[in-house]
Image: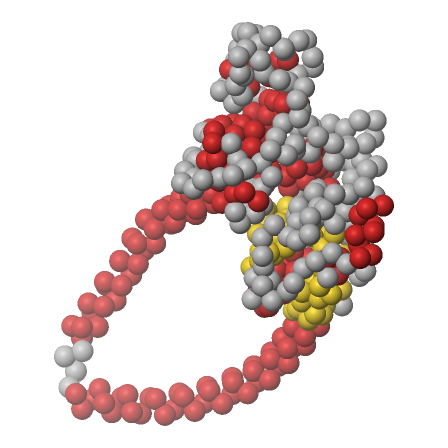
Amino acid sequence: MKKIIALAASLSICMTTAGAVRYSDTNGHWAEDIIDQYSDRGIIVGFDGEFRPDNHITRGEFCVILDRLFEYEDTAENNFTDLGDGFYKESVLKASAAGVIAGYENKIRPDDDITREEAAVMLCRAYDIELKPYNGESESVSEWAEDAVYTLMNNSVMSGDDIDELRASDSVTRAETLKMIYGIEAQLKVDEEPESTDEIEETALPSEEPSAEPSSQPSAEPQVSQTPSPSPEVTEEEITEEIPEEIPEEIPEEIPEEIPEEIPEEDTEETANSVTVYIEASKVGAEFIIEPVEIEFNDGDSAAYALTAALDMAGFTYASSGDLSSGFYLNSISGLDAFSFSLPDDVISYLDENDISYTAEPAAAGTLGEFDFTDRSGWIYFVNDEMADVGMSDYILSAGDSIALRFSLDYGNDL
């Protein structure tokens, strides 16, 4: 548990640090910001200037990442018949000693691609996550992985409204691996915040209560004892004489001078700080989810703020990871029952030409998000008609900006 808290604390530091490592094949990728963060921390590395974000990751490589995250100390004895002297050997044995990975019939299959359900189980074990029991009957998730997959789905680490939409048996890519880890660490960070708030309140209360009690009691008691002593006639005369003299003199002089000067200045600043936001999904047959709308903002607000404000205004809900100030990633938008999504003929031609497999409809009615229609799909945002090169929470709004959220079927290459 101490390790988890340490990771959550370090997360807030790394999110605000500009990364030094950049790759030639991640510019504009949906996971670019997350990739940069974990590369800067030394959790994962690239290959000769490339990251290869869409390559699958093996069980052995997954153990290496977890070993770098948790810095395991104990090493299990090598009883696996298929674990040679590969670069991942020590990390696999450490993960085994930590109870994160288990073999089957003395085999660990280090060179096999890890599946989404295997990754879910290992991450829940590594981060000591309390599992939420799944009481249904899944058609696509192995029984031994149901609770882990269901838990991560309910915490928006894995996207979907139903456990059978999560493609549990599919292999995980390098980018998806980091996204899942980031989602868990972001959630751990959020879970820690109430504790720190309680601590602040607990330390504040003792200092406030003593200061309130002495100041109120002495002032209240003399007033009660003095009130009966003067005669009622004298008290009423003094009150009626003093009130008319003070009120007319102070109110007319102060109010007219202050109010006219302040209000016009505030109104001018608020109307100047606005951006135009729209959300479109033309690649799946919906020109506008949200037509261009003006969103007001304050200095320092990010693109994530503008987009979520537009979604809230339209009455849509969304699944995301991170927060508006750091690492915000939009997984999916829900409440889209009024829209009928399908692939236009020209889009189908594009997918066929690029050997991209696709489905005829999204995984869940009324929802549109990553992995709908293709395994390369997701929401990508633009600033002033240019694909943004920083994360949504890292772009600080300027008055007059145009912020667009567009649905892509091919990592943005089709936009």
Query: Picture quarter containing residue 78?
Result: top right
Q: Residue at x 58, y 63 (%)?
A: 337
Quadrant in the picture for the N terminus: top left
In the displayed structure, does residue 150 sit left or right of residue 40? left
Whether 248 is drawn above or below 355: the answer is: below
Whether 384 is drawn above or below 97: the answer is: below
Q: Residue at x 77, y 58 (%)?
A: 344
Measured as percent of width and height from the top left, residue 152 is found at 52, 40
Measured as percent of width and height from the top left, residue 360 is found at 69, 52
Question: Which of 346/332 is in front?
Answer: 346
Query: Picture quarter containing residue 384?
Result: bottom right
Question: Which of 204/282 is in front?
Answer: 282
Disc tally is 0
Quadrant in the picture for the C terminus: bottom right
Measured as percent of width and height from the top left, residue 308 is found at 61, 60
Query: Would residue 13 be visible to someone looking at this image?
Result: no
Measured as percent of width and height from the top left, residue 331 is found at 62, 49
In the displayed structure, does residue 23 sit left or right of residue 235? right
Q: Residue at x 45, y 40 (%)?
A: 137
Query: Would residue 2 be visible to someone looking at this image?
Result: yes
Question: Which of 232/194 is in front?
Answer: 194
Question: Which of 103/309 is in front?
Answer: 103
Whether 87 is drawn above or below 162: the answer is: above
Q: Residue at x 70, y 43 (%)?
A: 375
What color scheme is it? secondary structure
